[in-house]
Structure formats: structure tokens, C-alpha cells
Amino acid sequence: MQLKLTALIDTKSTPVVLRSEIIASFLYNCKMNVLKLDKQHTWHPYNSLPSRTKILAVKETYAQTIVLEDGSELVDAMSSWWSAIHGYNHPVLLQALQEQSQIMPHVMFGGLTHKPAVELCKKLADLSGLPSVFLADSGSVSVEVALKTAILYQKARGKNKNRFIALHNSYHGDTLGCMGVCDKKNSMHSLYADYLPNNIFCDVAELGQTIEKYKDEVAGVIVEPIVQGAGGMKIHDPKYLQIARELCTKYDIPLIADEIATGFGHTGKMWGCDHAGITPDIMVVGKALTGGMLTMAAMMSSKNISDTISNSQIGVIMHGPTFMGNPLAASVANASIDLLLSSPWEQRVRQIELLFQKGLEELKAHPLVADVRNIGAIGVVELKEASYAQAIQDHCVKNGVWIRPFGKLVYSIVAYTISKSELSKIILSIKEAIASIK
């Protein structure tokens, strides 16, 4: 850029004021080229290169708002893929980030430790009831670690069991181990089916009898508590969790709860498992862990599992992400958890739930709608066809709302700090978008 600016400006003859205007104009044009450069080089998630779907260039964020490069503003109905539970740019999180950046932005976690990570592990242990905490750098990685931990637990007990039981329509991440416990037939990972392990899948109603049938073959059972996310935004009665807990305890099979999407209050309780009054053997968290500011995740396990592995000939957990325990992310996560616990988040989420329930109810009678459901900060409209997604997104964006439909699903998961007027705008935009379909 410096060479191009030099070519534009004769520093000897061009007045200072004019030089500033030229530089400002150049930088503005650079910004306007964001989408052009994006189309040439940037491969977006679940997309082609160049992108088949519309991509919007973001200039900045604040509160519940995304500001685009053209200056237009969108209320974020997705809370940045369900992570920004406090909204954007929260001063408490920014302060934690800034303060830690001056002390120690990063240091390897192998053979070293530090206060932010240790404090975070203690907080997660207290919140989950699972005292052994492994910090990771993304949700998918934390699931990988959970699966490996369950396998190691079985090996430490002298059992060679490598298969898992998971639910139909399950989604647990995009890396290979995670894809192995995603429903191969009913998920975005069906193209990899021939490469993935032969795990066992069942409906929620069949979970108990499936555990009974395969109890001697499986290393663990993995579930998304209460809400199945990317696999269809399905909401289940908590009884299946109680059945799974009872049988996994009976047969000494680790029960893994994937709370990446449901954790930190999204369903109205701290954990999805809380709806059933159970504690899993292993829990994974991510997304909202840092309030959506930095990437970080964690796996928590019972002391029985960590002791069994640690006291066996295996002795260690063979996993070590380079940025595990990153001090910046850990500091922000600590601040986010403290901020959540000191806020009236339960009342806020309950109000969001009631607004979604009341606002989306009338869509049940719409001829294009198959179902409407909601829980906590989650509102879902399931259409009868998947071909309307782009039209609905376009309509909502035009009306100042960012939403990203997925197949037949038009859903919103919002920050707990969202105002009533902002949430009403989201609900109205969804209803108007569906009503506009011809």
C-alpha cells in the first residue's frame, strides 16, 4: 500500500491538506474493495469459492448491532453464532482483554500455568460439578478431546471399546472425530460417510433401549442436552437425559453432554442438563464461554474419569493444542462468566422466551410453516420447504435484521442484553419475511 500511495502523491509539491484527502480517499477505496477481495480469496464456512450466497462486509459492531461498510445497521438475531451473550464490545470484556494484553498475551501451556487459566478451570469446575478441566481452542476440538477421553477411560479399565452412541440429527462439530458422532445420513457431513467410524445412532425415544443393547460395545454416549442445534433445532423433553444418566451409571459408560450451544443459559438454565437435574461424566463448552469475543472451549470430566486415566499405565491425555489456555481468552472468559453470574440473566432469558412464544405463535397457522418452537433465548420457525432461505434473509437484512436461515429453519438466538424493541423488530421481520413469500 505504501508504494501505491507514493505513486499517487508527490510529497514535495502536494499540499499537506490535499495529501490527507488523497490518503483518506485511497483508504476508503480499499474498504470498498473488501467484497471484491473476499470473492477472490476468502472461503467462507459451508460455502463455495467464490461464495454462492450473499456476503455482507462488516465495518464494526456495538451492543446488539452489526454495522456494515455502507453504514447500514442490522440487529443481530444470531448473537454471532450463539456466542455473544452480552452483546458486542461489552466494556467489561474489553477491559479484561486490554489489561491481559499488557501482561501476557500468550504463553505455551505445556509445562507452564498461569492465573487466568487456573481461575477459569476453577470457575468451570464449580459451575459444572465436574472438577477436571481441559482447556481447548474451539468447540470441535473440545468434542474431540471428550471422545478421546472416553476411549482412554475404557482402555484404562482394560476394555477396548471405541464406538459411541449418538442421536439421529445430531451435530457435534466439523472435525473428523466430531463428524463421526454426527448423523451421517441427516447432517451436512453425509459426503464423508465412507470415511467416518461406524458409530450407533438412534432416536431420542430409543436411547434407553439402544444403550441396553450396545452397553458392552460403546466407549460413551454423547448427546446435545434438550436442544439439538445444527441438526434441526429440535427441542426435547428432558426425560431422555434422565434415562441416559441412569443407564450410563449402571453400566459405567461415560455420558458426554455437548453443551457448546446450550451452555451458559441459552435454554433458560445454566446447562441444558439442568432441565433434567443430572450431571454428565463429561461436558464440553464453547461459543458463549468468552461472551463471543475470542475463541476458546473446554472439556470438564468427573474425578473418577481423570483419576482412572491418570492412575493407569496410560497416565496422560494425549492432546495439546498450541493455544491451549491462552491467557487473553482465559481472562475474557473469566470476565464473561463473572458478568453473567452478576446479572439477572435468568429473568432476561425468561422475558426473551415469552416474547418469542407470543410473537411467533401466529406463524403456526401459516401454510408454509411446519412448526414453531422456542425455549430460553431460542426461537425457531421450521418451514415446509428449504428454498425460501435466501429470500427470507434478504427481506430481513433489508429491514435491518441479520438472520441466517439454515435449510428449512428460520431461527434466532439472541444476546441476553437485547432490548424488547430490538427483539420485537427481529420477530416482526421474520413474520413479514415469511408473509412476503409467493
Image (tube, rainbow, N blue to C red):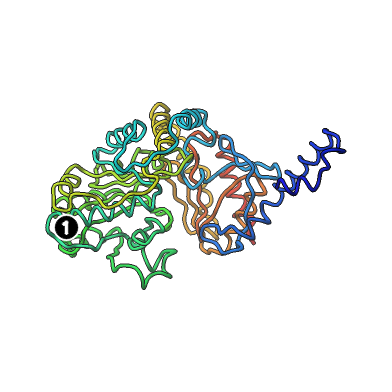
Q: Position of residue 277 (x, y in %)?
A: 25, 41
For the C terminus, the quadrant is bottom right
Instruction: State the residue lying farthest toward the bottom.
Output: 194
Q: What residue sits 17% from the left and 56% below the top?
A: 154
Q: Residue 133 lies in what quarter of the image?
A: top left
| Residue 169 position (above or below residue 22) | below
Q: Residue 332 lies in what quarter of the image?
A: top left
Q: Position of residue 42 (x, y in %)?
A: 58, 57
Query: Residue 73 versus residue 168: which sits nearer the camera?
Result: 73
Q: What residue sits 64% from the left and 54% below the top?
A: 394
In the rendered structure, the answer to whether residue 396 lies left or right of residue 155 reads right
In the rendered structure, the answer to whether residue 410 lies left or right of residue 335 reads right
Query: Residue 162 versus residue 24: which sits nearer the camera?
Result: 24
Q: Position of residue 36 (x, y in %)?
A: 68, 56
Element under label 1?
Answer: helix
In the rendered structure, the answer to whether residue 14 lies left or right of residue 140 reads right
Which residue is identified by label 1?
A: 155
Q: Position of residue 134 (x, y in %)?
A: 30, 44
Query: Residue 301 versus residue 427: which sits nearer the camera?
Result: 301
Query: Residue 177 versus residue 357: which sits nearer the camera?
Result: 177
Q: What residue sits 62% from the left and 49% below the top?
A: 396
* Amino acid type, residue under disc 1 in the picture: Lys
